[in-house]
Image (tube, grey):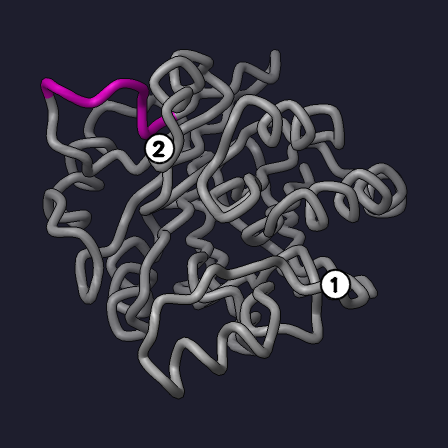
Amino acid sequence: MKNLLFIGDVVGKTGCDFLTEKLGALKKAHDIDITIVNGENSAQGNGITRVSADMLVRAGSDVITTGNHAFRHKDAMELFEYDYIVRPANYPEGGCVGSGVRIMDMGAYSVAVVNLLGTVYMDPLDNPFSTMDKILSEIDTPNIFVDFHAEATSEKKAMGHYLAGKVSGVFGTHTHVQTADECILGGHTAYITDVGMVGPELSCLGVDIDSAVDRLRFRIPVKFQVAETECFLCGTIVNFDEKCGKTHKMERIIIR
């Protein structure tokens, strides 16, 4: 049996610093074998840069997943040449750098980490369900964990049920608010609609409250700033059988 830790969207340098402060002890306390972190918003403003990616790796991330802001910064083209950073697999083939799948060789077993982007209220990428079908036909390991970066709860739920029994876990990201619906679907697949975030808790998804309210209230351009309040860390821990990929236990966590 192995333990996998999945950490929700890390917001800005503030979130990176808090992750650095807390992750080591968290991994030790729960005997974590593999750590996946969503770095979609780890750069100041959002997106991911070489600086923020390095902070996530030094903090203890084994794989960094992303989402709709994957290519926000100009150095992203170089970043995604590293196999420990993945972008959504359903970007159109042929013109997109990087990969949406990372296969980790753990010696006696291997683990696949898949990144997908939802298309409801999001960018019109390739169908994530069809993309996942193709990936499943090519992956030679039962231990498969999916970061489904999506806006709509319905799309996340549908993906979870669609992949029940086919993968070890489906973790929703993007909306930054941890949901209380963690479960094991079909007695096999860990699922949660949204893992949550790492960053300022008293905020609007990590953003300074006043600027977020002004943007919604007055409909004017506003420069978002990361809130300067106390941080929290949201994630989930999955205990799985590395021989067959079956999840036996799932625990939702919040660290303040």
* Magenta span: 94-101
Whether residue 58 is situated above or below residue 26 in the rendered picture: above
Q: Image check: 226 left or right of 84?
A: right
Residue beneath the point at 54% across and 22% down: 50
Magenta-drawn stretch, dominant element (helix, strand or loop): loop
Q: Image check: 243 left or right of 126?
A: right
Q: Quadrant of residue 174?
A: bottom left
Q: Nearer the viewer, residue 103 or 256?
A: 256
Whether residue 3 is situated above or below residue 169 in the rendered picture: above
Is 2 covered by the magenta stretch? no
| Mark 1 surroundings within 10 Å by alpha-carbon count, few (fewer than 14), some (14 through 19), many (20 or more) | some
Residue position marked by numbered label 1 in the rendering? 228
Q: Image check: 137 left or right of 81?
A: left
Residue 213 rendering spot, x and y as whole percentages:
49, 82
Name the mark nearer the viewer: 1 or 2.
1
Q: Name the mark on residue 209.
A: none
Residue 31 rendering spot, x and y as whole percentages:
82, 39
Quadrant (top left/top right/bottom left/bottom right) for the C terminus: bottom right
Residue position marked by numbered label 2 in the rendering? 87
Residue beneath the point at 38% across and 81% down: 216
Whether residue 25 is situated above or below residue 151 in the rendered picture: above
Residue 200 rendering spot, x and y as whole percentages:
70, 64
Q: Quadrant of residue 35?
A: top right
Q: Image check: 239 left or right of 143?
A: right
Q: Nearer the viewer, residue 53 or 86?
A: 53
Q: Earlier in the sequence, mark 1 or mark 2?
A: 2
Q: Quadrant of residue 130?
A: top left
Q: Amino acid at mark 2?
A: Arg
Q: Amino acid at mark 1?
A: Glu
Residue 218 rendering spot, x and y as whole percentages:
36, 85
Spatial CA distance of label 1 from label 2 is 29 Å
Secondary structure at numbered mark 2: loop
